[in-house]
Image (cartoon, rainbow, N blue to C red):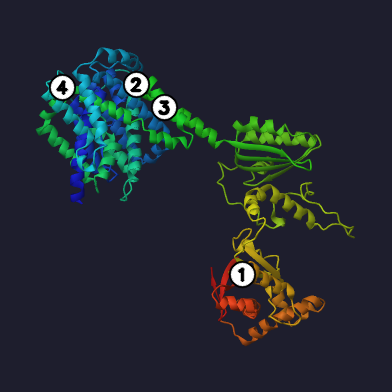
Amino acid sequence: MLRHDLPASLVVFLVAVPLSLGIAVASGAPLAAGLVAAVVGGVVAGYLGGSAVQVSGPAAGLSLVVAELVTTYGWRATCMITFLAGALQLLLGVFRVARAALAVSPAVVHGMLAGVGVVIALSQLHVVLGGSPQRSAIENLVELPQQIIDNHNHAVFTGLLTVAVLVGWTRLPQRLRIVPAPLAALFVASATAGVLDWNITQVDLSQSLGEWAAPAWPKGDWHGISAAVLLVALLAGVESLLCSVATDKLHDGRRSDLDRELTAQGVANMVTGALGGLPVAGVIVRSTTNVRAGARSRWSAIMHGVWILVFAVWLGWMIKLIPMPALAALLVFIGVQMVNMGHLRNLRGHSEVPVYVVTMAGVVLLGLAEGVLFGLGLAALSALRRLTWVTVRATPEADGRWHVLIAGSLTFLGVPRLTSELHAIPAGAAVELDLNIDFMDNAAFEAIHAWRHNHERGGGTVDIDEIHDEWYSMAASGARMFPAKTPPRAPDRWWLPWAHRRRSRPRPAPASLPVIPAQHTPGGSSPAVPDLLAGAREFHRRTAPLIRPFLHAMARKQEPSHLFITCADSRIVPNLITASGPGDLFTLRNIGNLIPRWGSVPADDSVAAAIEYATRALNIRTITVCGHSGCGAMAALLGGGEKTSDLPALGRWLRHGNHTLARFVATESDGTDCGPLDRLCRVNVIQQLENLRTYPQVDQLVRAGRLQLVGLYFDIGTARVHVLEQPPVTASPL
């Protein structure tokens, strides 16, 4: 493990030193505070943290908050605020609420970081140009043109050289990029400034050490101080946890324990606050560098903190050689990189760019806290709009009826749109109202209920069909409502028998169904006709739009892969038990799924024609014979013809089952069946497969390996399909 973590820790150390110094400058804190935070973040957070490869330290995203706190309360009070924020993080971690931080919209987090990056870049650009940053981003932007015109000194050259190295370093061959770009840029700028004897300001670490002091209690409004503690704790915590989640995607090791990570961040912030360091958070730049450098465990982060400590104690004099404009240029570069266009592309697909833009603009124009609050508000409104979005569609049908579909979450927010659509329906019209909703509040119920009564008083009819859950029926009956949105479930209508459908009464066929005139039939129409026509209407409304593209493609030609021979029993639905669709099965159904043997007398051209057409014209590859439990035809065979005495045609047809009966008598039960009838039903499938082989075309194709014969048995009581092996007659569940 050490052979991977040791080199990775050195790489992260080289990245962390210049970034820590730069963030300290951007925060208005002593430079030593950046190094203290880097050491504490590496050692304490690395040792106690819940992520194996995350690296913590001073974060650029907190620099604006720290700069404001330093200006308002002073540096020592800011250290105490950091200590208290760490204690709050520790408390939140102990109560295991870390997962709640993931509820913050990434658009807000990325927008906040982008806004911080813009502010840092604008302020430090003035330092690069040899001037001083103003108090706000707007002032920095207004003063920038004059700053560019008036300043052309050595500071500008140093800054431009630093940026040029940072940009160009990524374009060098991999073998030349062993040294991280920030360190290379500062080295080149320092060396060039020293060789050419440029007159520029350099880092003064001695003054920084003089400012470095123990924390002190803040003086002032405790409401403001409490808000500052909460802001630092939440921002640092959320950034750390999101960094942990992002880092988990970069490696295949153990996943992060977020509660442990938040607790470790709290301890680290208490330590860094007590020692006079900057606030600590998980840093994605260092963590990504750590993973890419080959780190395998937390020891990489710990050792990187140790190297920073060694560097600060024994090699701190080297920091004095760094030009301040070079450090400012590094911050400008970091600030620009924080506006990540990749995040924008990801957010665009989810329509969250407005949240990102509003958050970034708020941070730049108003301040970090204000920008985050605006972003969170807009994100909440967007989520509320999506969660309560309702589809209301009212369409007239050819027979004068109106079909109304209401789908989604029906709340008071959707009532204006709902009532507008419903009141557009003509008075006296017959209305079919489909409610496919997962929630309905009282305002929405009252709106639908009142409209329904008014419409029915005007001579119209309203038939309400609740497809998802019965929100309307429960509210109308005064029953206790569901406490929250009900989860979606699989469609449960198309396979139900008519008797179990939720429609309350049958309806006549619409004019859109083809109607063929018929002769008068004594006794009137069958009660099943309205059900059949209602089913056709439901097919037109719900299923036809879904399968129309597929049926259109196969309108002129069918290419089934199976000939499926099964019983005419109404309980057997071939497409249901095989999960097949249009065009899959060429189906032959008869009583008892019987296949008369080739040349049998009397001949049955219906079955022979189907087999002939399937094998010669359609070139099917599989013939399946499917029997089922409780088959009436097999019961008649077993009863010796007593049940068919007044059904002469059926009696003649069942003669084709005599070979099945003979096979049944010649074999004994293997103990897997549920009685004589069940065994006969299974034996019948095997016999019909044997009968298929009497057809010359079938036998020839089977011998050539171009056709497969399969026997299935459907147990109706258990809704299980079994594959029958031949012989012996055994069954194995699918």
- Mark 4 or 3, nearer chain start: 4
Between 89 and 210, the one lying in front of the other is 210
> Can you say whether 97 is above or below 587 in the image?
above
Which residue carries the number 3 mark?
A: 359
Query: What amino acid is found at the position of numbered circle 2 in the picture?
Result: Gly
First in sequence, mark 2 or 1: give its number. Answer: 2
Lower position in the chain sequence, tag 3 or tag 2: 2
Circle 2 or circle 1, nearest the eye: 1
Q: Pointer 3: residues within 10 angstroms few (<14), some, or many (20+)? A: many
Q: Foreground mark, 4 or 3? A: 4
Q: Residue 215 at x, y = what percent?
A: 21, 25
Kind of residue sitting beneath label 1: Asp
Q: CA distance from mark 1 to mark 4?
A: 87 Å
Q: Secondary structure at mark 1?
A: strand
Report which residue position mark 1 lands on: 715
- Tag 4: amino acid: Gln
Which corner quadrant of the image does residue 270 belong to?
Answer: top left
- Would you name the residue on which mark 2 appears? 224
Q: Is residue 266 above or below residue 194?
A: below
Q: Secondary structure at mark 4?
A: loop
| Horizontal side of residue 391 vs 17, given as left or right | right
Sequence-wise, the earlier of marks 1 and 3 is: 3
Residue 605 location (% of width, % of height): 74, 74
* Lower sequence index among marks 1 and 4: 4
Marks 3 and 2, how far apart at CA: 22 Å
Residue at x-position 25% and y-position 18% = 129
Q: Residue at x 26, y 38 (%)?
A: 286
Q: Residue at x 72, y 53 (%)?
A: 535
User: Is disc 4 in contact with disc 2, using a CB cutoff of under 8 Å?
Assistant: no
Q: Which residue is mark 4?
A: 202
